[in-house]
Amino acid sequence: MAKARKELQTVIGEKGPVQESDISRLPYLQAVVKEVFRLHPPGPLLIPHKAEVDTEINGYIVPSDGQYL
């Protein structure tokens, strides 16, 4: 986190909160945020679905009694 703080201090300084236009000048912070979301996604990436009735998709039968991603 020290490296991210240093990048913020160097690029943003004391001007206030980070603006969207500043993000392109903060590559290390971008990488940190991407890694955090990779390790700890804010929500399930694949929400299970359930077919209400037996369904055929491209010749495959999808039974209504299972959960699918």
Image: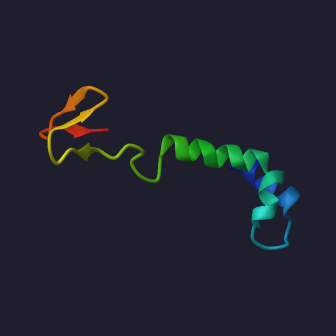
Taking 16 as reference, is 1 left or right? left
Task: Give the farthest residue toward the bottom.
Answer: 16
Give above or below for 63 relative to 33: above
Where in the figure is residue 63, as x and y percent of width and height?
15, 35
Taking 55 as reference, is 3 left or right? right
Where in the figure is residue 56, as x and y percent of width and height?
23, 34
Where in the figure is residue 1, as x and y percent of width and height?
68, 49
Q: How is the image coloured?
A: rainbow
Q: Residue at x 87, y 56 (%)?
A: 10
Residue closest to the eye, 49 or 1? 49
Q: Residue at x 76, y 67 (%)?
A: 19
Identify the image quadrant of residue 45.
top left
Residue closest to the eye, 46 or 9? 46
Identify the image quadrant of residue 21.
bottom right
Where in the figure is residue 34, as x and y percent of width and height?
62, 45
| Tag count | 0
Q: Residue at x 70, y 48 (%)?
A: 30
Residue closest to the eye, 46 or 19? 46
Taking 28 as reference, is 69 left or right? left
Give above or below for 36 relative to 15: above
Q: Quadrant of the C terminus?
A: top left
Give above or below for 38 relative to 18: above
Task: Give the farthest residue toward the left.
Answer: 65
